[in-house]
Amino acid sequence: MITKDNYETEALKDIFETAFFDCVVDKDGDLVVSSDYRVIVKSNPMLVQYVAVFAAKKGASRLTLLEAINKMNLELSVPRAYALTDGFDHALVLDYTVTIGDGVTAKTIVEAFRFFETCIRRAFNYYEDLLS
Protein backbone atom coordinates (compact mmCIF):
# COMPACT_ATOMS: atom_id res chain seq x y z
CA MET A 1 0.00 0.00 0.00
CA ILE A 2 1.31 3.43 -0.97
CA THR A 3 0.28 6.22 1.38
CA LYS A 4 1.25 9.83 1.95
CA ASP A 5 3.77 8.47 4.49
CA ASN A 6 5.52 5.93 2.23
CA TYR A 7 5.31 7.22 -1.34
CA GLU A 8 9.08 7.25 -1.90
CA THR A 9 10.82 5.88 -4.97
CA GLU A 10 12.09 2.73 -3.23
CA ALA A 11 8.56 1.68 -2.18
CA LEU A 12 7.35 2.10 -5.76
CA LYS A 13 10.42 0.27 -7.09
CA ASP A 14 9.58 -2.71 -4.85
CA ILE A 15 6.02 -2.78 -6.22
CA PHE A 16 7.18 -2.80 -9.85
CA GLU A 17 9.90 -5.38 -9.25
CA THR A 18 7.38 -7.64 -7.51
CA ALA A 19 5.21 -7.32 -10.64
CA PHE A 20 8.24 -8.37 -12.77
CA PHE A 21 8.93 -5.03 -14.42
CA ASP A 22 12.48 -3.92 -15.18
CA CYS A 23 13.18 -0.72 -13.27
CA VAL A 24 16.05 1.42 -12.10
CA VAL A 25 16.50 4.61 -10.16
CA ASP A 26 18.25 7.11 -12.43
CA LYS A 27 20.89 9.66 -11.43
CA ASP A 28 18.16 12.24 -10.69
CA GLY A 29 16.49 9.85 -8.24
CA ASP A 30 13.54 9.13 -10.54
CA LEU A 31 12.19 5.63 -10.95
CA VAL A 32 12.36 4.48 -14.57
CA VAL A 33 10.19 1.50 -15.48
CA SER A 34 10.81 -0.24 -18.79
CA SER A 35 8.41 -2.53 -20.56
CA ASP A 36 7.09 -1.64 -24.01
CA TYR A 37 8.04 1.97 -23.27
CA ARG A 38 10.39 3.84 -20.95
CA VAL A 39 8.25 5.50 -18.28
CA ILE A 40 9.40 7.76 -15.46
CA VAL A 41 7.42 7.24 -12.25
CA LYS A 42 7.32 10.29 -9.99
CA SER A 43 5.56 10.65 -6.67
CA ASN A 44 4.78 13.00 -3.85
CA PRO A 45 2.50 12.64 -0.79
CA MET A 46 -0.58 13.29 -2.95
CA LEU A 47 0.00 11.40 -6.19
CA VAL A 48 1.91 8.95 -8.35
CA GLN A 49 2.57 10.19 -11.86
CA TYR A 50 3.63 8.22 -14.94
CA VAL A 51 5.52 10.23 -17.59
CA ALA A 52 6.69 9.18 -21.06
CA VAL A 53 8.71 11.49 -23.33
CA PHE A 54 9.08 10.94 -27.07
CA ALA A 55 11.24 12.90 -29.50
CA ALA A 56 9.57 14.27 -32.60
CA LYS A 57 11.05 13.27 -35.95
CA LYS A 58 13.65 15.61 -37.32
CA GLY A 59 11.95 18.27 -39.37
CA ALA A 60 8.54 17.96 -37.66
CA SER A 61 7.26 21.45 -37.07
CA ARG A 62 6.17 22.71 -33.69
CA LEU A 63 2.79 23.62 -35.19
CA THR A 64 2.21 20.11 -36.54
CA LEU A 65 3.10 18.62 -33.16
CA LEU A 66 0.79 21.02 -31.32
CA GLU A 67 -2.08 20.29 -33.73
CA ALA A 68 -1.68 16.54 -33.17
CA ILE A 69 -1.57 17.05 -29.39
CA ASN A 70 -4.68 19.20 -29.51
CA LYS A 71 -6.51 16.54 -31.54
CA MET A 72 -5.59 13.85 -29.07
CA ASN A 73 -6.58 15.93 -26.06
CA LEU A 74 -9.96 16.60 -27.69
CA GLU A 75 -10.65 12.98 -28.61
CA LEU A 76 -9.11 11.07 -25.70
CA SER A 77 -9.68 11.86 -22.04
CA VAL A 78 -6.37 10.35 -20.96
CA PRO A 79 -3.42 10.56 -21.05
CA ARG A 80 -2.63 14.23 -20.86
CA ALA A 81 -0.41 15.29 -23.74
CA TYR A 82 1.79 18.34 -24.15
CA ALA A 83 4.84 19.51 -26.05
CA LEU A 84 8.31 20.37 -24.81
CA THR A 85 10.20 22.83 -26.93
CA ASP A 86 12.64 24.51 -24.54
CA GLY A 87 16.02 22.85 -24.97
CA PHE A 88 14.56 20.16 -27.25
CA ASP A 89 14.10 20.00 -31.00
CA HIS A 90 10.52 19.05 -30.15
CA ALA A 91 9.22 16.40 -27.80
CA LEU A 92 5.86 14.96 -26.91
CA VAL A 93 5.12 14.23 -23.26
CA LEU A 94 2.31 11.96 -22.10
CA ASP A 95 1.41 11.64 -18.45
CA TYR A 96 -1.15 9.99 -16.22
CA THR A 97 -1.74 10.54 -12.53
CA VAL A 98 -3.02 8.30 -9.73
CA THR A 99 -4.20 10.08 -6.59
CA ILE A 100 -2.90 8.55 -3.35
CA GLY A 101 -5.67 9.88 -1.08
CA ASP A 102 -5.88 7.67 2.01
CA GLY A 103 -3.77 5.05 0.28
CA VAL A 104 -3.53 3.14 -2.96
CA THR A 105 -2.80 -0.56 -3.30
CA ALA A 106 0.13 -2.07 -5.15
CA LYS A 107 -2.38 -3.70 -7.50
CA THR A 108 -3.84 -0.29 -8.39
CA ILE A 109 -0.34 1.15 -8.99
CA VAL A 110 0.48 -1.67 -11.43
CA GLU A 111 -2.94 -1.66 -13.12
CA ALA A 112 -2.70 2.11 -13.62
CA PHE A 113 0.76 1.64 -15.17
CA ARG A 114 -0.59 -0.98 -17.56
CA PHE A 115 -3.49 1.32 -18.42
CA PHE A 116 -0.98 4.11 -19.14
CA GLU A 117 0.90 1.78 -21.49
CA THR A 118 -2.37 1.16 -23.35
CA CYS A 119 -2.92 4.93 -23.54
CA ILE A 120 0.55 5.34 -25.04
CA ARG A 121 -0.27 2.81 -27.74
CA ARG A 122 -3.53 4.66 -28.51
CA ALA A 123 -1.67 7.97 -28.60
CA PHE A 124 0.67 6.62 -31.26
CA ASN A 125 -2.35 6.49 -33.59
CA TYR A 126 -2.23 10.30 -33.49
CA TYR A 127 1.53 10.72 -33.56
CA GLU A 128 3.14 7.85 -35.45
CA ASP A 129 4.12 10.11 -38.35
CA LEU A 130 5.68 12.63 -35.98
CA LEU A 131 7.69 10.47 -33.58
CA SER A 132 11.09 8.94 -34.05
Image: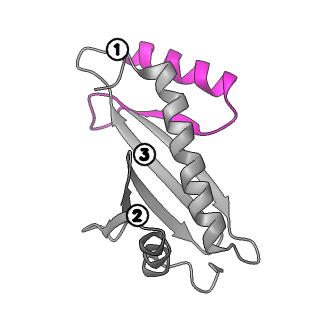
Mark 2 and mark 1: Cα distance apart in space: 35 Å
Mark 3 and mark 2: Cα distance apart in space: 16 Å
Task: Answer with the quarter of the image where residue 7 lies.
Answer: bottom right
Q: Give the range drawn in magenta.
A: 62-91
Q: Three-letter amino acid code at disc 3?
A: Ala
Q: Is residue 53 visible?
A: yes
Q: In front: 71, or 22?
A: 22
Judged by depth in the image, the label closer to the viewer, 1 or 3, is 3
Which quarter of the figure is the N terminus placed in?
bottom right
Position of residue 18 in the picture relative to residue 107 (left or right) = left
Q: Point out the tag, 1 or 3, that comes first from the N-terminus.
A: 3
Question: Where does residue 17 sit, x and y in percent of width and height?
Answer: 41, 73
Q: Crowding at label 3, few (<14), some or many (≥20) Cα neighbours within 10 Å?
A: some
Task: Answer with the quarter of the image where residue 37 lies.
Answer: top left
Q: Is residue 47 visible?
A: no
Q: Point out the tag, 3 or 2, that comes first from the N-terminus.
A: 2
Position of residue 59 in the picture relative to residue 75 (left or right) = left
Q: Name the mark on residue 52.
A: 3
Q: Which residue lies furthest to the right in this view?
A: 102
Task: Answer with the quarter of the image where residue 36 lies.
Answer: top left
Q: Three-letter amino acid code at disc 2?
A: Phe
What residue is pinned by disc 1?
Answer: 61
Q: In front: 94, or 13?
A: 13
Q: Is mark 2 on a helix, strand or loop?
A: loop
Q: Mark 3 near mark 2, Cβ–Cβ under 8 Å?
A: no
Q: Three-letter amino acid code at disc 1?
A: Ser
Is 116 included in the stretch rendered in magenta? no
Question: Where does residue 119 sit, x and y in percent of width and height?
Answer: 56, 38
What residue is pinned by disc 2?
Answer: 21
